[in-house]
Image (cartoon, helix red, strand yellow):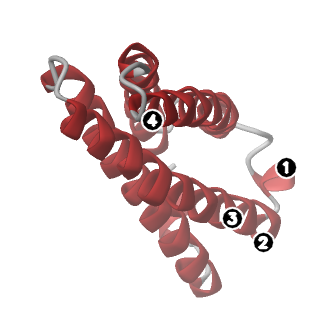
């Protein structure tokens, strides 16, 4: 695989930068939300920070990451060159499942945040942030797959 990296055309550098930038933003937001879930211990302020980091930073990061991935995929003709290698499949599985987990987490967290106004909702908000722990584990797997490129 290192040979492919050496002969990558320069026109793929910017789409790759967009993909990696979005992935870094997404992982940072997920790490913040997961840390808030672990360390909150009922603290509503920390739960709110975790939720808002997932909503305001993680969701845009996911969109940027996915746009960059599709941009690279379309320009590089991965179907022809790489015959859909394992690492590409892992990336797509994690991205698709990650989108589902982010949406579920944002819905649960939004309901929980709304209910915090009336004194409830802490459990929903906590559950939403614990989903981000699962998402973080999946993202770490994807980072490994993108770096190691297993066949």
Using residue 113 as the reference point, say whether residue 45 is left or right of it.
Answer: left
In primary-sequence order, the first of circles 1 and 4 is 1
- Mark number displayed over residue 113: 4
Residue under label 1, please give it.
Answer: 79
Q: Secondary structure at mark 2?
A: helix
The residue shown at (56%, 26%) is 108
Instruction: Report the quarter where the C terminus lies.
Output: top right
Q: As displayed, is residue 124 above or below residue 93?
A: above
Label 2 crowd bin: few (<14), some (14–19), many (20+), radius 10 Å: few
- Mark number displayed over residue 75: 2
Across and down, in percent, residue 61 comes to 50, 59
Is there CB contact under 8 Å for labels 1 and 2?
Answer: no
Q: CA distance from mark 2 to mark 4?
A: 41 Å
Residue under label 3, please give it.
Answer: 67
In this rendering, which labeled residue sits more in front, label 1 or label 3?
Answer: 3
In this rendering, which labeled residue sits more in front, label 2 or label 4?
Answer: 4
Q: CA distance from mark 3 to mark 4?
A: 29 Å
Front one among 21 and 85 = 21
The answer to whether any part of residue 2 appears in the image is: no
Across and down, in percent, residue 120 comes to 40, 19
In this rendering, which labeled residue sits more in front, label 1 or label 4?
Answer: 4
Residue extending furthest toward the right? 80
In this rendering, which labeled residue sits more in front, label 3 or label 4?
Answer: 4
Front one among 113 and 133 = 113
Q: CA distance from mark 1 to mark 3?
A: 18 Å
In primary-sequence order, the first of circles 3 and 4 is 3
């Amino acid at each position: 695989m290192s040979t492919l990296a050496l002969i990558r055309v320069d026109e793929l550098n910017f789409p790759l930068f967009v993909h990696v930038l979005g992935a870094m933003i997404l992982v940072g937001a997920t790490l913040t939300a997961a840390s808030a879930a672990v360390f909150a211990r009922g603290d509503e302020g920390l739960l709110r920070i975790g939720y808002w980091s997932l909503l305001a930073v993680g969701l845009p990061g996911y969109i940027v990451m996915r746009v960059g991935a599709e941009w690279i995929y379309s320009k590089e003709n991965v179907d022809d060159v790489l015959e859909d290698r394992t690492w590409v499949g892992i990336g797509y599985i994690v991205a698709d499942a990650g989108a589902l987990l982010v949406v579920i987490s944002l819905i649960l967290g939004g309901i929980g945040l709304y209910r915090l106004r009336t004194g409830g909702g802490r459990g929903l908000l906590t559950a939403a942030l614990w989903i981000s722990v699962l998402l973080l584990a999946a993202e770490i797997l994807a980072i490994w797959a993108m770096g190691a490129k297993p066949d």
